[in-house]
Amino acid sequence: MRFYKLCVDGTNSFFTYCDENDEYKIGDRVVVNFRGKEHGALIVELENKNEFEFKVLPIKRKLANEISLDETYMKMLLWVRNYYMCKFEQILKAAIPSDLKVKYDEVYKLTEIGRNDYKNPIVNYFLEREQVTKPVLRKHFSNEFIKSAVEKNILTVNMNKKICYNFKSELNCENINFSENEDLKKLKDYFTRKSEMMKTSLENKFSKKDIEKLVKDEKLIFIKRVKEKEEKKEILKSEENIIENAVLNEEQQKVRDEILNSDKKYFLIKGITGSGKTEIYINLVREALLRGKGSLFLVPEISLTPQMVERFKREFNEGVAILHSRLSNKERGEEWLKIYSGEKKLS
């Protein structure tokens, strides 16, 4: 067992953690428990003692797909810290590219108590997000596996013939090892992602006061966790490419249905700022993607591009390409055709 000094993200001090199995080294990006929550941290140097007056927590794991820093480089950063008498976090911000810094996911999730309050609009919204149709689920799992999971009450079918995951099934199915069965792990991960809602998305849809009340009543839980980098995968034109599922209100749904059911080619949606026009656009784009088609969304003002791109990436994962207005209409058309045909990859 070894002991290391770590720089925990968001702090200006070093903290001691243990490496129980001697599997980490100086310069590694790791995850630790800090004040009851997961935090990213950087292993800075070896601790020069082995006995402590306080409990030393173990390092939880190494961050996936993160670049480790060279030990010599770490020594140089420590020398800079001591020579200029500045905070180590300031040095890291200047010395490490932003893409290498640990990022966090902030999500809300229903508790078991909250699931019983189905009349609450926020709770009902979460429960609706967790439901999928059998054709959608069959894109990810075989029909035989789905049937077996339903028989074992791992999956349940509601009155609307939508399929839900029984999160209590692990407690009830004593003869099934969920951790070793790859299909069951994949199934649980699939529905776990659907059961969570990004903090910004939920707070844009419902009042913060109502959300905080559910958290206070322990019906909703707020989770902040380290966001680990994933290897880039091929982008699919399918339901997998859609993350958020914006729910329209009655008036928005009416406009959306009229457009989809009409034979006309052009529509003008008129409404004041904040009336939800963008929600309708996004819903129509989603429908086009599910039908195997693509969409062009024109941003009216260049200053709105960053926030609009961020919004669309939240809704549609990585399937978003940006075409700059400096191109002529002909050039933009040619670029889009290359992307749509697969000749050029989305970025």
Image (cartoon, rainbow, N blue to C red):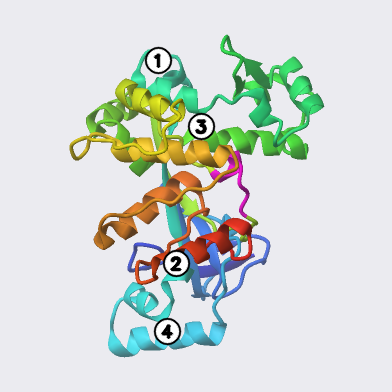
Q: Nearer the observer, disc 3 or disc 2? A: 2
Residue 218 drawn at (x, y percent): 37, 25
Q: Which mark is residue 77?
A: 4
Q: Please indicate, yes or no, whether residue 56 appears anywhere in the rendered image.
A: no
Q: Nearer the viewer, residue 205 or 83?
A: 205
In the rendered structure, does residue 238 fall within the stretch colored magenta? yes
Label 1 sits on residue: 117
- Identified by mark 1, the residue type is Asp
Label 3 sits on residue: 195
- Identified by mark 3, the residue type is Ser
Q: Nearer the observer, disc 4 or disc 1? A: 1
Q: Which mark is residue 330?
A: 2
Characterize the local packing of mark 4: few (<14), some (14-19) or many (20 or more) Cα atoms within 10 angstroms: some
Residue 228 drawn at (x, y percent): 54, 57
Identified at 30% across, 27% down, the residue is: 216
Q: Is residue 116 left or right of residue 275?
A: right
Q: Which residues are magenta?
A: 235-241
Q: Secondary structure at mark 3?
A: helix
- Identified by mark 2, the residue type is Lys
Q: Secondary structure at mark 2?
A: helix
The answer to whether residue 237 is above or below residue 196 is below
